[in-house]
Image (cartoon, helix red, strand yellow):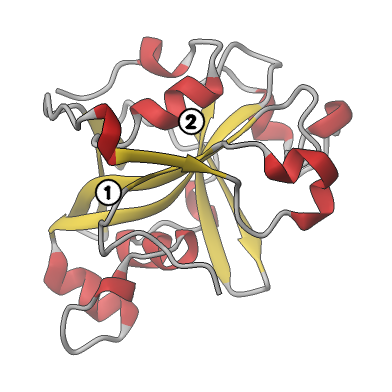
Amino acid sequence: MKLPKEFYTRPDVVGIAKELIGKYVYSHIDGMLTGGMIVETEAYAGENDRACHAHLNRRTQRTEIMYNEGGVAYVYLVYGIYNLFNIITNEKDRADAVLIRAIEPEVGVEEMLLRRGFESIKPNLTAGPGVTSVALGINRKHYGEDLTGNTIWLEDKSIKLPEQSIAAGPRIGIDYAGEDAQLPWRFWVKGNKWVSRKK
């Protein structure tokens, strides 16, 4: 079942980030269907989170989409190379987001291999937010994409992961955020080979 708008507009971004573990994300781009199970996420809160792009109500051309009602895509470039796919949550003007860090491939694996330039499947195909976006064909053209549409969407397949199988810890690559860098707002499936690894 495709996740409805109401899933995204709830106020608890940390809770949503955890709930997204075990959900599925799909893209239908250039005529190709690709997707898989979400195995790693990070939450970012617009209010009082120094790691969030919208901290202190910062509004720029890049962050403007964060102030939309939840259920749209926020895609931005890092290191001049990778597009990171985020899901906007909460009500209009709250600027909360969940970064999709890793998926376990399910469909369209051959297309993912082509997009990544791989000859065979290996964990770093989709282990990390930048490479996940590449594998799914998501880029900045999808900034603001409606996640209840038919280009990028999420599904609930009624998979209930045991509570003890989901880990929580600090987010990655946000040392600039001071004490907020230690918030346990990253979630992942314990022992899953598709989860990204700290460098």
- Seen at 28% across and 33% down, the residue is 164
The percent coordinates of residue 131 (x first, y second) are: 41, 68
The percent coordinates of residue 174 (x first, y second) are: 72, 54
Q: How many marks?
A: 2
Name the kind of residue labelled 2 in the image: Val
Q: Which mark is residue 27?
A: 1
Gap in Å between the C-alphas at discs 1 and 2? Answer: 14 Å
Name the foreground residue: 147 vs 195.
195
188 relative to 30, above or below: above
The answer to whether any part of residue 150 appears in the image is no
User: Mark 2 — residue?
Assistant: 72
Residue 11 appears left or right of 55: left
- Seen at 68% across and 72% down, the residue is 79
What SS does tag 1 mark?
A: strand
Classed neighbour count for the residue bearing mark 1: other residues with Cα under 10 Å, few (<14), some (14–19), many (≥20) = many
Name the kind of residue labelled 1 in the image: Ser
Residue 159 appears left or right of 51: left
Quarter of image, res 122:
bottom left
Residue 174 appears left or right of 59: left
Name the foreground residue: 11 vs 140.
11
131 relative to 95, above or below: below
